[in-house]
Amino acid sequence: MKLPPLKALPVFEAVARLNSFSLAAEELAVGQSAVSHQIKQLETYLGEPLFIRTGRYLALTEEGRQYFDAISTALLQIERASEHILGHETARLRLSVFSSFAVRWLVPRLPALRKEWPQLDLSLEMSGENPQLSDRVADCFITVRPTSSAFSYELLYTERLFPVCSQQYWQTLCREQNIDPNLQHAQTAPLALSALQGLPLLSTHSIYNKTGGDWAAWYEAAGQPLPKDTRLQNFSHMLLALEAARYHQGIALTNDYMLSNRSDTADFVRLPCHHVMTGDQFYFAWKTSRRHEPGIQILRRWLVQQSIESGLKQ
């Protein structure tokens, strides 16, 4: 068996993960010169540069990125196997998750996860966009793009959008348009689209990546174009649009996980109107080669259970 310099592998993993020679030296409790020596020794053995160094700028080369993806998984498996034999195994996982999904759905449920699975040490990596599926980013992911053949996926939620407003805004709307306030509890969609005519609509740009795209899709689902005189107020993120709705600034389109078992859910009224499917599906993703790791399987089963109990997954 021909192996590379084994002492250099955890050094390379630390430098690549932290993107810094000095931070890696601090973490490993060695001098920076020792880190540089190990990296040089590994690059000499492989015959390829692993890092691009330009002044203070440090980045992995393409060969370095590929090597890191493979080495980090192997080192983690060695660590897990050793902890299991030693009898003090702790499942440490980094989960990359969309900020809105984390804040509105996942974080409020973490105390229950810690109570049920105290051996699971979970840290969250917040992502504003769909995360890159790589061990450099996290150990597992919430993603809407199940495209990598190296990963396995478990469906958690198929997204739909529906209009909401604050309780105060709803009462004002009912009073001004002579609407029965109890209509919000109707099981059908009896509120006419004309009731929204002229009202400020709070739009989230990131859903369809165009101004008013969410409301245009919602009207299209009802067979009508977005009215030309619509008063749109644009936000980059659904969290912002929902906060504006909370403070009586108009009507926002939101989804199920944003209003799922939160203490402030009662602040909002879901208007008795139709919904629109965005086409996005949220998956829990993990590298198939790591499918036997207990921590990943614990988190997978727990997320699916919570998704079902909260009504996200039918």
Image: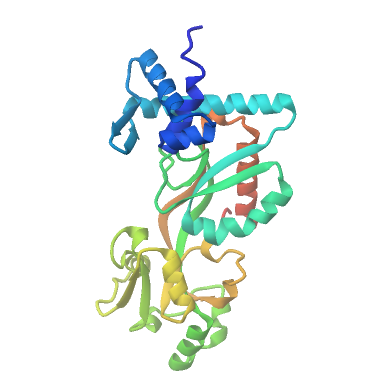
Extreme right residue here?
87
Residue 139, x across and y down, in percent: 52, 38
Residue occupying image coordinates x 49% and y 53%: 158
Residue occupying image coordinates x 67% and y 55%: 111
Residue 209 visible in image = yes
Q: Nearer the viewer, residue 233 or 1?
A: 1
Q: Looking at the picture, does residue 244 appear above or below residue 107? A: below
Residue occupying image coordinates x 40% and y 63%: 237
Extreme left residue here?
228
Residue 76, x across and y down, in percent: 56, 29
Q: Nearer the viewer, residue 45 or 223?
A: 45
**Left or right: where 57 falls relative to 42:** left
Q: Looking at the picture, does residue 160 appear above or below residue 266? A: above
Residue occupying image coordinates x 69% and y 50%: 114
Residue 58, x across and y down, in percent: 34, 35
Residue 127, x across and y down, in percent: 44, 51
Q: Nearer the viewer, residue 252 or 273?
A: 252
